[in-house]
Image (cartoon, rainbow, N blue to C red):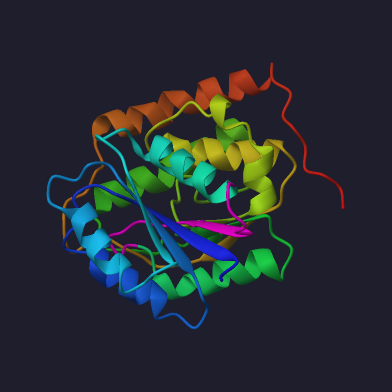
Amino acid sequence: MSDSIVIIPTYNEKENIEKMIRTVFALPKALHILVIDDGSPDGTGQIVKGLQTEFQDKLYLVERTGKLGLGTAYIAGFKWVLEREYQFVFEMDADFSHPVDKLINLYEACAKEGADVAIGSRYVGNVVNVVNWPIGRVLMSYYASKYVQFITGLKVADTTAGFVCYRREVLETMEFDKIRFKGYAFQIEMKFTAYKCGFILREIPIVFVNRVEGTSKMNGGIFSEALFGVIKLKLGSWFRNYPQKKQH
């Protein structure tokens, strides 16, 4: 049994998913994996099912009927995990943009170093650690994070990061029915909510590598959701009481 599980949302990741699963299971720390597949027409879900016999009791799959958004995939995953005994819950992409070995660093930050939320950050210390992105996208992402920091007051450089470890208590405290965003703004909302609930967020530097296989899910709608959603998030927080971290 492992105390930790990695949630990987997928849509058309057949080029990456088997290699990703094997890479996570090869790490020196025992981790389980939960794949949330949004009805990938390329057969991603079938590949995972085929691997479940090899990785019994540590590889799990939730299949959904359509492309329902990143945020709802993670919330479905969080609810699944909270029905079980896991103490540390990770978010990670299937496309190897996140360095898999850094899962260990995120775990240690939460398990041993006092963080409640550990974030694999591309932008720690004003350094941009991104490989293979066009310069326009790097600048857009970097300044979007600066904008989010400015509006929300979050002391997190990489607010849209999708490589995260949560202590169980963080997810138990959050009210998932009040999480509004579906796309990349979901990542901002999760961090902002954890911060408002009194949890400790810590960034761990990583190098982010743009996907080699498969196609990116980024589009203009996702960006505008983040841009305008952040203002709504901040305004809404003035009229909301957030449940607070329990003092141990």
Q: Quadrant of residue 195?
A: top right
Q: Is residue 41 left or right of residue 223?
A: left
The spot of residue 22 in percent (x, y) is: 32, 75
* Residue at x 37%, y 46% (from the top left corner): 141
- The magenta region covers 83-97
Q: Is residue 50 left or right of residue 29?
A: left
Q: Quadrant of residue 56?
A: bottom left
In the image, is residue 150 above or below residue 40? above
Q: Is residue 23 left or right of residue 133?
A: right
* Residue at x 32%, y 51% (from the top left corner): 138
The spot of residue 217 in percent (x, y) is: 24, 43
Q: Secondary structure of the magenta portion, mostly?
A: loop
Q: Nearer the viewer, residue 197 or 155?
A: 197
* Residue at x 71%, y 52% (from the top left corner): 200
* Residue at x 28%, y 28% (from the top left corner): 221
Q: Nearer the viewer, residue 12 or 216?
A: 12
Q: Is residue 136 left or right of residue 185?
A: left
In the image, is residue 112 above or below residue 186? below
Q: Is 93 covered by the magenta stretch? A: yes
Q: Is residue 5 visible?
A: yes
Quarter that holds the N terminus: bottom right
Q: Nearer the viewer, residue 84 or 197?
A: 84
In the image, is residue 238 above or below residue 139? above
In the image, is residue 131 above or below residue 176? below
Q: Is 46 covered by the magenta stretch? A: no
